[in-house]
Image (cartoon, rainbow, N blue to C red):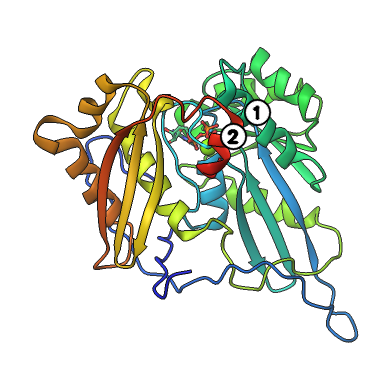
Amino acid sequence: MPDHIPRRVPYAPPPPPGGAPAPPAAVDNPRRVPYAPPPPPGGAAVRSGFVALVGRPNVGKSTLLNAILGTKVSIVSDKPQTTRTRVVGVLNGPDSQVIVVDTPGLHKPRGPLGRHLNETASDAAGGVDVVVLVVDGAGGIGSGDRYVAATVPPGLVVVNKIDLVPRQAVLEALAGAAGLGVPDPWPVSARTGEGIPELVAALRGRMPPGPRYYPEGTVTDVPEAFWVAELVREQLLAVTRDELPHSIACRVTEWEWPRVRCEILVERESQKGIVIGRGGAVLKEVGTAVRAQLPPGAFVELFVKVDRDWARDRRRLELLGY
Ligand SMILES: Nc1nc2c(ncn2[C@@H]2O[C@H](COP(=O)(O)OP(=O)(O)OP(=O)(O)O)[C@@H](O)[C@H]2O)c(=O)[nH]1
Ligand SMILES: [Mg+2]
């Protein structure tokens, strides 16, 4: 681990399209070593447990995790299959600890990467205390959601993105979500925060008595170097289109804080130019946006490399941290 650990940026909802990005604010360095301390003498009652957020791609699971935590720990984009790993967020309270796990969107896979993402999601949802099925209240509830509900039976359903539709449509979405097998779906907007405190209270209430699985103050288990690579990928997702997002992987190859070297892998020679941009414009924009989310002084060097096979087999995916 580096001496200087990049700090998490408190979660701020994304600015409206065209708007200026919100400046990052400082938070304390969270330490992230999982451990289970012995219960206190006399046993002050702590409720703790695991919640998995599952759903189709793009319904807003990662945005919801960030909103629940009040801190950005999972990257977000408007492209499907943004999340490629299990991402742990820890919500600490005076007498509770809720560990919320973000997962890749469950979808019909088109190759080894897709199959790997689906497996990661199903595995992450196994054995948790509450599976939360997230659906898109603005996009309609359909066969993809029913497939997820059948694959990983939920204990609670969240209808997200209610800020995008009028009240009447929210009621219709709630009625549709009730058909997914769990009564009383929860309406929320991960973007505006509407309904989030109520959802958090409900999740806390469902935790059984148990230990704090992570030290208080822990926010996530995402390793720092992986986080920087994820921030780079998030920015690339924001500026690229079509198939390109699925062809990109990022990995940090050198960490001499505050200097970080990050490689961007693309699958085809033709994609290299798009990622670099005219005169390096895209890389420059990506680097600036990533640096803005790291502690002052961070210097992120970006390199683009063609690697036809990064998404082709499980071993390669694991080497990339997926
Ligand atoms: N208006 C609105 N947009 C939202 C809301 N929640 C998420 N979004 C947007 O929906 C898109 C997808 O969000 P993500 O959080 O990346 O979705 P995801 O379910 O994690 O997607 P995968 O990781 O691909 O499975 C992004 O453009 C978000 O900004 C919401 O409550 N309201
Ligand atoms: Mg996600």
> Considering the numbered disc 1 on the image, is that residue within a helix, a strand or a loop?
helix
Dot 2: element: loop
In this orientation, which residue lies closer to the viewer: 86 or 54?
86
| Relative side of 43 to 312, left or right | right
Q: Which residue is mark 1?
A: 118
Q: Residues within 10 Å of mark 1 (few under 14, many from 20)?
A: many
Residue where numbered disc 2 is placed: 104
Q: Which mark is residue 268?
A: none
Q: Is residue 11 visible?
A: no
Query: 312 or 155, which lies in front?
Result: 312
Amino acid carrying label 2: it is: Pro
Queried on whether the Cβ of the residue with tag 2 lies below 8 angstroms from ligand 1, the answer reads: yes
Q: Position of residue 1 (x, y in %)?
A: 48, 69
Q: Give the side of residue 211 with respect to residue 56, left or right.
A: right
* Residue 157, quarter of the rendered image: top right
Compared with residue 24, is residue 145 higher up or lower down, i.e. above or below?
above
Q: Name above or below for residue 9 compared with residue 158.
A: below
Q: Position of residue 294 (x, y in %)?
A: 33, 61
Residue 260 horizontal/vertical position (percent): 31, 58
Q: Is residue 114 visible?
A: yes
- Judge left or right: residue 174 versus residue 233: right
Amino acid residing under circle 1:
Asn
Residue at 17 percent of width and 31 percent of height: 277
Count of numbered marks:
2
Residue beneath the point at 26% across and 43% down: 303
